[in-house]
Image (spheres, rainbow, N blue to C red):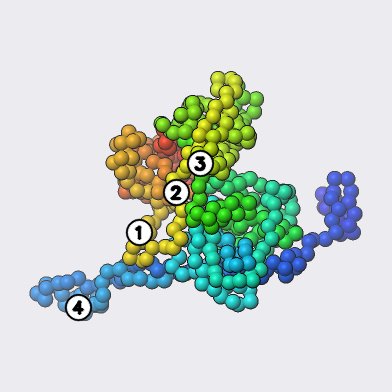
C-alpha cells in the first residue's frame, strides 16, 4: 500500500495519468476570483435592542421588619424591572445589483434594529430590510448606493459533485476571509428545511460566513452559504449552501411583493422505504407516501387518499418524499397541476388546484423593543413549545399536548414546527403530554444519555420520532 501511494503521488506530481486516474497539474489558483469578485462581498453587522431583568433589588419592607436592616445594608437599591441592552451579530452578504440590493441570510438580519454593511474598501452603509423568508433563510436588503460592483450568477444545475468551489465571508468577524473546497453532494434535504435542495460542500464555513457567496471556478455565484452540521458549533467538514436560482426567485418575490407565495396541496407524507415499496407493489422505492390528507384541502378535493403514493407532480418526478414540498412550494397558488398516484397496484392520474401556504415572512423591520414578544428559551432538544389553544385542541380532537412553535439547533429527530407532542416514552415508560410545561418537566427528568421517543400528531397522522441520547466524547 505504501509503495502504491508513492507511485501515484509521483505520477500526479509529474502530470501523468494512468488508467482511471484523472490528469492533475496542480491545485487551482483562486486569486483571480478573489481579485475580481471580492469587492462585491460585504460584511454585515446588526444591532438588536433586547430586554433583560435588572439585578435583584431590595424588596419594599417596613422599617420594623426584621429583614429591613439586612437588605438596607447589603442589597443595593436602584431602578427595578426590565432594562434594555444591545445585542450584536455578524454575517456576510453580496451585492446583486449596482443600485445597492444585497442578498444574505434571513437569520442574519432577523429582529435587527440597525444593519451596517461594510465593503472591503472600508466604506460603510446603513441598510434596510426589503423582505426576508424564514423558510428558505433568504433575505434581501438595500443600501443607498450606486455604481456598485455586483456578482455574476452561475447555474447550480450544471454543478458536478467533486468540482472546486470558493467561499468569501467574515467568519467570527474576520472580514474577507477566503476558503475553498469541493461540492460534496447536490439536492440535500435537511431537517426542517423542506423548500431548499441544498448544495453540500466541504468548504470551511463558520459563524459569520452566513449569507456569503459560494463561487464556482468561473467566478460565478452558485449558492449562499447558509448553515453547517456541527457537534461543536464550529466547522466539521459539512457545509450547506442555498442554490442561487432558489435564492434569486425568492429575492425577486420579496422585491416585488415583500413576501413569498408558495403552493400547498394539504397532505402529510413520509418516505417510501424498500419494504414499503415491496408491500405496495412498486418496482423500486420512489415517491411520497400519503399518510394524512387535510379535510377539505386541495388534495382531498382532487381525490387523493391516505395510502396513495405520489409519483409525479405536474410532470415532474417525485424521486423521494423530500422532493414533493419543493416542487409544490414552487408552484403558483391557484394553478392546476396533474398528480400521478400509485394506488392498489396501478397508476392513477388526478388534477389538483394548488392552494397557498399561509404567510410566514420575517417583517421588514423588527418591532420596537417594547413591542417585541419576549424571547422564549428552547429545551435541550432544541424545541420551543407552547400550550395548545382551545380551537386547536378541538380541531385535532385532543385533550392536551405541547405545540412545537420553533425548532432550533437541528434536533436529532423528525420534529417540525407545527407538530403536536402528545406522548413521551423513555426507559419503557410512556407519559401522556398535557401541556408545554409538563413536557419540559418530563424531558428534564431524564438525563441526556436517555433515548426518547416522541409521539407526534401531524395533521391527521400520528408519527413516532426517536431521539437518541447523547454520549460523552461523541
Q: CA distance from mark 1 to mark 3?
A: 31 Å
| Residue labelled with disc 2 | 359
Q: Quadrant of residue 251?
A: bottom right
Q: Is label 3 or label 4 in front?
A: 3
Q: Quadrant of residue 175?
A: bottom right
Between discs 4 and 2, the one toward the N terminus: 4
Q: Give the CA distance from mark 4 to mark 1.
A: 35 Å
Q: How packed is label 2: few (under 14 Cα within 10 Å), some, or many (20 or more)?
A: few
Mark 3 secondary-structure assignment: loop
**Disc 4 on helix, strand or loop?**
helix
Residue 100: x and y in percent read: 58, 67
Q: Residue furthest left?
A: 64
Residue at position x 44%, y 58% in the image: 363
Of labels 1 and 3, the one closer to you: 3
Label whose residue precedes the other's in the sequence (3 or 4): 4
- Residue at image mark 4: 72
Residue that mark 3 sits on: 333
Q: Earlier in the sequence, mark 1 or mark 2?
A: 2
Q: Are marks 3 and 4 in contact (CB under 8 Å)?
A: no
Amino acid at each position: 500500500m505504501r509503495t502504491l501511494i508513492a507511485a501515484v503521488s509521483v505520477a500526479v506530481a509529474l502530470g501523468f495519468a494512468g488508467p482511471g486516474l484523472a490528469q492533475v497539474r496542480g491545485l487551482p489558483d483562486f486569486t483571480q476570483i478573489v481579485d475580481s469578485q471580492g469587492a462585491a462581498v460585504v460584511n454585515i453587522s446588526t444591532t438588536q435592542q433586547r430586554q433583560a431583568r435588572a439585578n435583584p433589588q431590595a424588596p419594599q419592607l417596613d422599617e420594623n421588619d426584621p429583614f429591613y436592616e439586612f437588605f438596607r445594608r447589603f442589597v443595593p437599591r436602584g431602578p427595578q424591572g426590565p432594562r434594555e441592552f444591545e445585542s450584536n451579530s455578524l454575517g456576510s452578504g453580496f451585492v446583486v445589483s449596482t443600485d445597492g440590493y444585497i442578498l444574505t441570510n434571513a437569520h442574519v438580519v432577523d429582529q435587527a434594529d440597525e444593519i451596517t454593511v461594510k465593503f472591503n474598501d472600508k466604506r460603510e452603509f446603513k441598510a434596510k430590510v426589503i423582505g426576508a423568508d424564514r423558510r428558505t433563510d433568504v433575505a434581501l436588503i438595500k443600501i443607498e448606493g450606486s455604481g456598485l460592483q455586483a456578482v455574476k450568477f452561475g447555474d447550480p444545475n450544471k454543478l458536478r459533485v467533486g468540482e472546486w468551489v470558493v467561499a468569501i465571508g467574515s467568519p467570527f468577524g474576520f472580514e474577507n476571509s477566503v476558503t475553498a473546497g469541493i461540492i460534496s453532494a447536490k439536492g440535500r434535504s435537511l431537517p426542517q428545511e423542506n423548500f431548499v435542495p441544498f448544495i453540500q460542500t466541504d468548504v470551511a464555513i463558520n459563524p459569520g460566513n452566513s449569507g456569503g457567496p459560494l463561487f464556482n471556478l468561473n467566478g460565478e455565484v452558485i449558492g449562499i452559504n447558509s448553515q453547517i452540521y456541527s457537534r461543536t458549533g464550529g466547522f466539521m467538514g459539512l457545509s450547506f449552501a442555498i442554490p442561487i436560482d432558489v435564492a434569486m426567485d425568492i429575492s425577486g418575490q420579496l422585491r416585488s411583493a415583500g413576501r413569498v407565495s408558495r403552493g400547498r396541496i394539504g397532505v402529510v407524507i413520509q418516505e417510501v422505504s424498500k419494504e414499503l415499496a415491496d408491500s405496495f407493489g412498486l418496482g423500486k422505492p420512489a415517491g411520497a407516501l400519503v399518510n394524512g390528507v387535510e379535510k377539505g384541502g386541495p388534495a382531498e378535493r382532487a381525490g387523493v387518499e391516505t395510502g396513495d403514493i405520489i409519483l409525479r407532480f405536474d410532470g415532474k418526478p417525485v424521486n423521494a418524499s423530500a422532493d414533493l414540498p419543493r416542487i409544490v412550494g414552487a408552484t403558483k397558488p391557484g394553478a392546476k397541476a396533474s398528480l400521478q398516484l400509485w394506488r392498489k397496484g396501478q397508476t392513477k392520474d388526478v388534477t389538483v388546484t394548488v392552494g397557498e401556504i399561509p404567510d410566514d415572512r420575517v417583517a421588514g423591520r423588527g418591532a420596537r423593543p417594547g413591542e417585541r414578544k419576549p424571547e422564549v428559551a428552547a429545551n435541550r432538544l432544541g424545541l420551543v413549545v407552547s400550550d395548545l389553544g382551545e380551537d386547536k385542541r378541538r380541531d385535532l380532537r385532543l385533550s392536551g399536548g405541547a405545540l412545537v412553535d420553533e425548532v432550533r439547533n437541528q434536533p436529532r429527530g423528525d420534529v417540525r414546527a407545527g407538530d403536536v407532542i402528545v406522548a413521551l416514552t423513555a426507559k419503557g415508560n410512556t407519559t401522556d403530554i398535557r401541556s408545554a410545561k409538563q413536557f419540559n418537566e418530563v424531558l428534564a427528568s431524564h438525563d441526556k444519555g436517555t433515548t426518547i421517543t416522541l409521539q407526534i400528531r401531524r395533521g391527521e397522522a400520528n408519527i413516532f420520532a426517536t431521539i437518541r441520547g447523547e454520549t460523552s466524547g461523541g
